[in-house]
Image: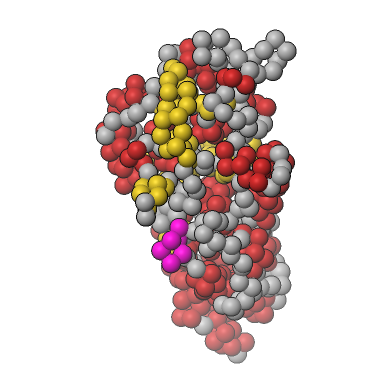
Amino acid sequence: MSPAARYYITTAIAYANNRPGLHTLFEVIGADVIARWHRMKGDETRFLTGTDEHSVNIAQRAAELGKEPLEFANENVALFRGAEDALLISPDRFIRTIDPDHVKAVQEMVRRAHANGDIYVGTYEGWYCPAEGFKAPSDVVETSGVTRCPNHPTVTLEWLSEHNWFFRLSAYQERLERHFEEHPEFAQPDYRRNEMLGFIRGGLEDFSISRAVGTWGIPFPIMPDGSSSQRADGSWDPDAGTVYVWYDALINYVTGAGFPDDPAGFAHWWPADLHVIGKDIARFHTIYWPAMLWSAGLEAPRHVWIHGFLLTQGERMSKSLGNFLDPIDVVRALGADGARYVTLREVAFDKDTEVSWDSFVRRYNADLANDFGNLLNRTISMANRYFDGERPAVGPDAGLARVWGEALASYQDRLAGCLLHDALCALWDVVGAANRLVDAEQPWTLAKAMKAGDEAAGVKLRAVLGDLVEACRLISLAVAPFMPTAAPRALTQLGYAYPYGPDGNGGPALADELRWGAHAGEAGRLATAEPLFPRLETEAATPAAG
């Protein structure tokens, strides 16, 4: 991708019905890494995340607490924003479904679908999940005689019969099948794509896009007779109902790109390059959403990446079960960089992963405190001690350079494929090779020989430490999207300026900086070595769950 390319990435927007857990923000951390990577590459990047605030369960929970829905939502949005700030999340926009431009975008999408003949009035009777909407008979489960939503097993379903507007999803079945076949990269990983294609081939049913009751939501802009529901005074006729929460929520992605009031901006940013979403909402994003866009005369997103869940003892991590990790507590224990690294190294970005607090601490100690932290610390300490702070130049030995070249190619390939855990694994192959070089060459032995007058040992020592300094420089830069504050601290200790802004913008194209020996011949001095990742005890500062 050329440096002038643009890149638009989004996450699913989270229900603002509770404080966030680390599992809620897992995909946001991953998307932030991908956005930072593109910024540092020189791509014009837009990163969108936010909150979904019109769900029925938000209104219900607010009423239980004696609060207005907006007051309740504002309190929870503040918790999301605080947690994301603590994790160094850097969106270009944090969108809320109550934002005025989003309300306009949703109503315009409804009008376009109506003008295209894709929505109609009908009656729906069935199970309604307050967190998700009406459920097809095939999409509920019976547990001990109780009907449950598989995605929200603790939420009580309601049997409802309503006069609603429906979207003709069935009219797009052939086009969706063709799109999946012609664009295999559209929904990934492959096994998730195959699941969605199987669902499409099983036959698509039209779905409800309005609610006839309640006022907490975006006013439906059309009356049953096709006239506008907006009154002369600008208010909306409550008899028109509100827009169904999922139809509303999906549209945030085009709102964030400038639809409909900024046509030039929208033409620049749409279609989205990547939606990062969880497996429980894959149907909405890979089947409902493209059809909605086509109905409005818009393009489908280019890629949808479907990740799995964080599991604890085989169960999905969730706030309702009380088995989740508080992101603020995780940051307090591991630091923002440590929390980001450990989450994305321990949790596969393509499937469900069993995690625990102990596994997080072990990963932090092994990868950060021991392997990388120790490599950086002893490299700088030895170079300072043996060469009076002068930064040794890259030596002629090609061993680490070759390892770096192979690892960088793998790292870039894994990042492009959204396999963030594997990308980090590729970088840590270099960390391991560099530590093995220290053990094999024993710089302290070479230094002793140099001090005794062995000139060859001195040349060898300078070359070894020069290669180690270069490896540390490259690893620090490459890992910067994952650990955005540790990277500049490491570069400073190595005597290099960190040319990128706090969100990864600015500075030279990262590809140039990641060449082995990119700054060969530039004199410099090392700073004092300072540990970046203090070692933790396994039991220390265990975050509260629930």
- Position of residue 260 in the picture relative to residue 435 (left or right): right
- Residue 124 lies in quadrant: top left
Left or right relative to 174: residue 358: right
Q: Quadrant of the C terminus?
A: bottom right
Expressed as whole percent of the image width and height from the top left, the position of residue 282 reads 41, 41
Q: Which residues are magenta?
A: 311-316
* Left or right, 499 with reference to 350: right
In depth, the one of 534 and 240 nearer the eye is: 240
Picture coordinates of residue 142 (x, y %)? 35, 49
Report the residue that reaches farthest toward the front: 145
**Residue at x 49%, y 47% (from the top left corner):** 156
The residue at 62%/50% (across/down) is 18
Vertical side of 52 occupied by 498: above or below: below
Q: Using the image as rendered, state which of residue 37 and residue 109 is in the foreground.
A: 109
Q: Can residue 403 be seen here? A: no
Residue 383 placement (x, y as % from top left): 63, 75
For the point 63% across and 53% down, which residue is it? 19
Residue at position x 53%, y 36% in the image: 7
Examine the rendering and report whether any part of residue 458 can be seen. yes
- Between 499 and 66, the one lying in front of the other is 66
In the image, is residue 89 above or below residue 474?
above
